[in-house]
Image: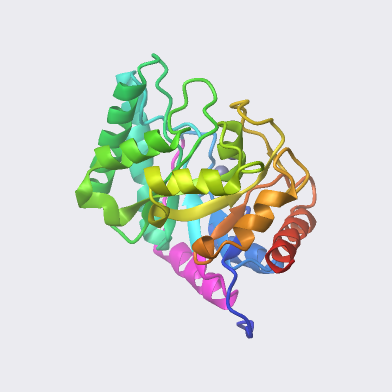
Amino acid sequence: MARTRTRQPSLLGAHVSTAGGVERAPARGAEIGADVIQIFTKQVNRWAERDIDQGTAAAFRRALFEHSIHIAGSHDSYLINLASPAAMLRERSYRSFCRELERCRALELDFLVSHPGNATDGEGAAGLRRNAEAIRQALAAVGGPTRVLIEATAGQGTALGSTFEELAELLRLIGSRFQGRLGVCLDTAHLFAAGYDLAADYEGVIGELDRVVGLERVHLLHLNDSKAPLGSRVDRHEQIGKGHLGPGPFRQIMRDRRFRDVPKVIETPTGDDPVRANRRNLDYLRRCART
Ligand SMILES: [Zn+2]
Ligand SMILES: [Zn+2]
């Protein structure tokens, strides 16, 4: 039975588990009151691929409808490095990324979040060009409704995409032909670790984002507090309001009309009780929107 809704969806949700099959994920979203879910469509730390058969895809779509999940997307594998200077790893990453897109197409997902790769040789500009080329080729090779969202990184090691300038450059290099299937995903924890002080200067950071990237390119927000301090370039998520970001920026984001229609997904630590932990963080964010 579909839940009857008397309110506008808040477009708030969480990364949820696909244990037992992707078709089980929408119920896990409903259990925590989510309008949006993000999933992995395979094991993220393995190269092994999987296919989505028609029956699974149909069961997934039915479950989304039954549980009133308005938006569903995926996050790509952690092994993929489309910017790698090593031809073999880049080729393997490219094939794996295409498979990610194929599974997204089969499931009719709204978005696929992709981390920019690592320029392990320290040549950032060349890394961005390789990354852009691979995404352009993949979008040309695999069609479908899914929008690829380049996620801003914390800038750990040689990770690309930790500045608004690099994100904008990556989008520009991918080229105008594919802009309708592209966008960015911003993670509050990553931005903060990369040196963007959302806690002390929220308006300044969002203003810079608008000038360099454009707010209209932001199609998803990852709302996570940060266990790591400002500018540490370390990616460690924390419960909302309990980390170095604290409650302030979340209150501002949840009340910011410019982000009203942008889906917001938490990827906060879940411990051994994901339902309880996710509910607590989502309730916190809903309170931020009200008070
Ligand atoms: Zn994220
Ligand atoms: Zn992260």
Q: Position of residue 290 (x, y in %)?
A: 71, 69
Rendering quarter of residue 53: bottom left
Task: Identify the residue at horizontal 23%, vertical 47% (top origin).
Answer: 141
Q: Give the residue at the far left of this rendering.
A: 177
Query: What count of labels does the image hold?
Result: 0
Q: Is residue 59 magenta?
A: yes
- Camera sees residue 113: no
Q: Position of residue 190 (x, y in %)?
A: 57, 37
- Camera sees residue 51: yes
Task: Identify the residue at horizontal 75%, vertical 40% (top origin).
Answer: 243
Locate the N terminus by quadrant. bottom right
Task: Identify the residue at horizontal 56%, vertical 36% (top origin).
Answer: 196
Image quadrant of ligand 1?
A: top right
Looking at the picture, tell me which residue is in the foreground, 203 or 59: 203
Q: Is residue 68 magenta?
A: yes
What segment is highlighted magenta in the picture?
Answer: 48-71
Q: Indicate left or right for 273 with 84 as reference.
A: right
Q: Position of residue 158 (x, y in %)?
A: 47, 21
Locate the C terminus by quadrant. bottom right
Task: Identify the residue at horizontal 33%, vertical 32% (top origin).
Answer: 131
From what the image shows, is residue 289 above or below residue 142?
below
From what the image shows, is residue 195 above or below residue 249?
above
Q: Indicate left or right for 68 with 120 as reference.
A: right
